[in-house]
Image (spheres, rainbow, N blue to C red):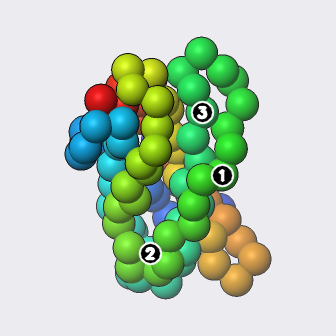
Amino acid sequence: MRQGGLGWRLTPTLHVALWASLTVSWVDHTGGLASTSIERRLQASPQYVEVATALPGVGDYLDDGLRKNRWYCYRVRAWFAGESSDYSNEACGRAR
């Protein structure tokens, strides 16, 4: 994974939480300084949409209200004071 211009690295992982939801989690290497943008796409689509922004120090996001048995992919990036990291690697999972 490449590091962003700010030297921050984010590594997302997915956990199936509840029916029709997914939990995205990441490791914050910013020392709790940066917010995190969470983006999602359907696995069959190339277009990402921002679904949430996590406050500094937060390391997970529950994405609920998803359609059952659909595959979703996520990426995250840190941002602080007008600068942002590169996007993370993609993590995909099936909502159940």
Residue type, label 2: Thr
Residue 82 x/y as whole percent: 75, 77
Q: CA distance from mark 2 to mark 3?
A: 25 Å
Residue that label 1 marks: 50
Residue type, label 1: Glu
Callout 1: helix, strand or loop? strand
Instruction: Identify the residue at horizontal 24%, vertical 45% (top origin).
Output: 17
**37 and 79: which is toward the camera:** 37
Q: Is residue 62 left or right of residue 78?
A: left
Disc 2 crowd rating (10 Å Cα; few below 14, some 14-19, many 20+) is some
**16 and 14: which is toward the camera:** 16
Instruction: Identify the residue at horizontal 30%, vertical 29% (top origin).
Output: 96
Q: Is residue 10 left or right of residue 96?
A: right
Callout 2: helix, strand or loop? loop
Q: Is residue 56 visible?
A: yes
Q: CA distance from mark 3 to mark 1?
A: 9 Å
Numbered badge on residue 41: 3
Q: Nearer the viewer, mark 1 or mark 2?
A: 1
**74 and 70: which is toward the camera:** 70
Instruction: Name the N-terminal-most of marks 2 and 3.
Output: 2
Q: Is residue 6 visible?
A: no
Q: Relative to 31, is 92 above or below? A: above
Residue that label 2 marks: 30
